[in-house]
Amino acid sequence: MSEDNIKSLKVKRSSRLSGFYRETPERRRKRLVESRWLAPEDAEACAGLGGFDEACADAMVENVIGLHGLPLGVALNFVVDGQDRLVPMAVEEPSIIAAASYAARLCAEGGGFSVTADGPITTAQVQLLDVPQLEAAEAALRAQTEALLAEANALLGNMCARGGGARELEVRVLDATTLVVHVHVDTRDAMGANLVNSLAEHLAPRLASLSGGRAGLKILTNLADRRKVYVRVKVPSAALASERFPDGAVVREAILEAQRFADLDPYRAVTHNKGVMNGVDAVLVACGNDWRAVEAGAHAYASRFGVYRPLTSWREGPEGALVGLLVMPLATSTVGGAARTHPGVQRALKLAGVTSAVDLAGLAGAAGLATNLAALKALSTEGIQKGHMALHARRVAAEVGAKGELVECVAERLSRERVYRPERAREILAEEVHRKGASR
Ligand code: MEV
C-alpha cells in the first residue's frame, strides 16, 4: 500500500460531485483537485494519454505499432465500508459510468456498500498422469504435505517476508489414473500468476515421484474460488421511487421479478452477469488488472452447480428495503505488471485510494453490484433505452457546440422530439442561443 493511498483514505472527501457530468474533461479534473481527490500534478498528467507512451507500450507487449486509447472516467457517489470513494473506470460503452454513479447514489441512501473478502489466495495446479495406484499416491502426497509446503515456502522467501506464502496442499482425483495437486498460496497484493506457475514447475518433479506417475501441466487455475469477494447493499424502498414510479415498493418488486428471471433462465443469467461485469471490468481495466482472468473465473463460478446462475442476488429485506449481494471470485493485483509500468494505472489506483489487492477487489465488486442494480431497475421499469438516449442526446448537443446549461436544454428538446441528428441539434442550439440573447 503506498503512502499516498493511506493518506488519501484519511482525508474526508465527498464522492458526490453535483453537475460533474455537465463539465468538460478539463473542468472535471479541476474539480477533482478542488475537492482534494487529485493532486494538481496528477490532474494535469491525466489529460490525453496520461503519460502512457510508445516506450511504455513497447516494454509491455510485443510487436507494438502504436497505442490504443479508451475513455477514463470516474464513477461518483460510492460509499464503501463507510468511506467515500471515487471509482476509476476505463470503458468504451456509453452509460456504464453514469449507471454505476446513479446506482451508487441509491445504495448510499442505505449506508453504501459493505465488503468482505477471502484472503488473497491463488492456486497452482500440477497434473499427475499415469498414476499406477491412486489411493497409495494420494496417501503419499498427503503424508508429505508439511514437507512440500516447507519446500514451497523456501522458494517463496520474498512473498513469505511480506506475510504471504503457501498455505495448503489439496489432492483431487480426476480419473482412474490422473490426479491433480492444488497448492494454495497467499500472494498478498499480487495476483501471483507468475509466482505460483514457477512454484508449480518447481514442485512438479517431487509430486510426480511421490505419486509414481508423471507430471503434466503446471499452471494456476483462474477459478479463484478461494479469492472471492462479497459485497452487500441495502437500498431503502423510498430511494427506488421516481416521478413515473412514485411507489418504491413497486420498483423493488419489479427488480425482484427481474432477479427471478435470471435465477430461472441461464439465457437471462448471462446477460444479468454481463451487467455485473460492465462495472467490474471497467474498474479492472482502469487499474491495469487481468480482466480476462476475472471473466473466466466469474463465469466458471456462475456455473458451479452445473447450471449457469446469476452472480448477484436481490431480495426484500427489513422494512421493505431492497437487499443485494454479489459473490464472485475476484483475483486482483496492485503490484507488478501494469501497476508498475503504466503511469495511468498508478494514478487510477491513487485516485481510488486503493490500499491492497483485496481492497481493489471490493471496489470492483461494488461497481459490479451497482451496474447490475442500475440495469435491473431500468429494465424492470422504464426500459434502458430512455436513459441511453438521454445520454446520447447530451453527447450530440455537446458535439454541436452547446456549453453549460445549453447542453441540458438542447438535449431535452432532442429527447422530446426523439430526433438525435446533429443538424437538428444545431438548429435547436441556434434557437436557444437566440432566445437567451433576446431575454437579456
Ligand atoms: C448492457 O451492457 C447490460 C445489460 O444488458 C445488463 C442486463 O440486461 O442486466 C443492460
Image (cartoon, rainbow, N blue to C red):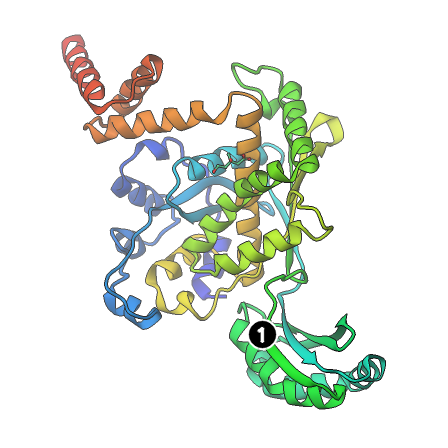
What percent of the width, then of the height, locates residue 233?
Answer: 64, 39
What percent of the width, then of the height, locates residue 259?
Answer: 66, 33
Q: Residue at x 39, y 61 (%)?
A: 346
Q: What is the number of callouts on the image?
A: 1
What percent of the width, then of the height, locates residue 184?
Answer: 67, 72
The residue lying furthest to the top in this view is: 439
Q: Residue at x 67, y 86 (%)?
A: 214
Residue 168 shows in this picture: no
250 sits to left or right of 172: left
Q: Nearer the viewer, residue 255 or 243?
A: 255
Q: Residue at x 72, y 26 (%)?
A: 320
Q: Nearer the viewer, residue 186 or 95?
A: 95
The secondary element bearing badge 1 is classed as strand
Q: Residue at x 39, y 46 (%)?
A: 91
The image quadrant of residue 344 is: bottom left
418 sits to left or right of 126: left
Q: Residues within 10 Å of mark 1 (few under 14, many from 20)?
A: many
What percent of the width, then of the height, locates residue 307?
Answer: 70, 46
Q: Amino acid at mark 1?
A: Ile
As displayed, is residue 347 above or below residue 438? below
Residue 334 shows in this picture: yes
Q: Quadrant of the C terminus?
A: top left
Residue assigned mark 1: 219
As displayed, is residue 28 above or below residue 10? above
